[in-house]
Amino acid sequence: MRRHVRLYLTAARFDLVEHARNRLAMVLVALFIPAWTSLAHAVIPSRTVTFRLRATGRLLAPAGNQITQITGAINAVTLITGFMMFAVTFSGGRFDRRLAMSGYPRIHLVLAKSTSLALASGIIAAYATAVICTAWSPRQPVQLAAALFCGAMTYGALGVVFGSLLRREVEGMFALVMTSLVDVGLQSPLASGGTESAAVHLLPTYGTMQAATAAGFTGHRLPGDLAAQALWFAGAALLGLLAFHRRTKDALTARRPFRLPWPPGHRPPAPPAARAPSAPR
């Protein structure tokens, strides 16, 4: 048991160190979240926006800048968490393969990534909720933080999927940005007027948007929408687990997974010739 705990803690420490080295992500967490939410509150007009909350069926009329802060927080939290997990998965893929080849249990690597994802999502969600609370008082700040946490976990798992499957960093960043823009943009009451299309139920952060909006302007608790968001996370996490398993399995079965090819025009040195046995005297 002690050996398994030690292996898990070592792998978790590796992942947390990788996150801490991602200075761009740290800057985005510290500056982008308060800057974006503060600009939304200051620039967007405060006139009321009427729309129907699909989860409860009630008509809501919140201030435009307040609902924009919630949608902006969802967009920022999901993008940053997805970027962090994509970066650590993409850059640490070779290291994970080497650990697997040396006999390191893959289950400990998966648990370590899950732990780092949960810690990052919890810190970012709590920070974004605190920033919103400095501008106005949501009716249910705890549910708001829980909704942001679930959305961050979902996009963190998607970041692991993109980091495991895509070959270039620009592809992963484009996939994350476009997914979040389409996802949050189609649900934004300010942009879409609270669309009545049933297709929004299939979007990755539908549960987060419904629970966060209800937390900001109503007293309704929506555990069902948070549970639906957890299902999205479970599906994305399963895809990430399969991609991670395939990557490390390929490394285990490859004959020479880390030997680089020789440059054009160069030949590898010939192996030393075996010495012939000396004739008996």
Image: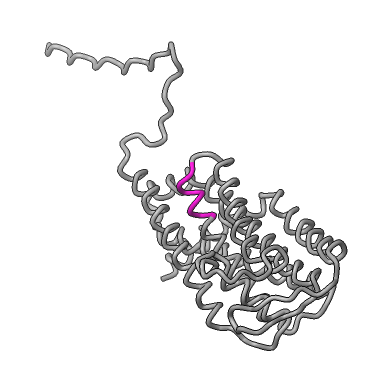
Find out whether residue 165 is within the magenta segment: yes
Residue stretch rendered in magenta on the structure: 159-166
Residue 152 percent across, percent down from the top left? 60, 65
Q: Is residue 83 above or below residue 257?
A: below
Quarter of the rendering occupied by the C terminus: top left
Percent x, y for residue 50?
73, 76
The residue lying furthest to the right in this view is 42
Q: Please tell me which residue is depicted at 58% across the width and 49% down the height of the picture.
A: 87
Q: Which residue is more in the foreground, 126 or 140?
A: 140
Q: Up-down: is 249 above or below 266? A: below
> In percent of the image, x 63 and y 66: which residue is there?
187
x and y, in percent, of residue 22 in the image: 66, 49
Quadrant of the rendered image containing residue 32: bottom right
What residue appears at the point 84 percent right and 72 percent down from the top-left corner?
47
Q: Nearer the viewer, residue 219 or 113?
A: 219
Task: Residue 73: name its quadrant.
Answer: bottom right
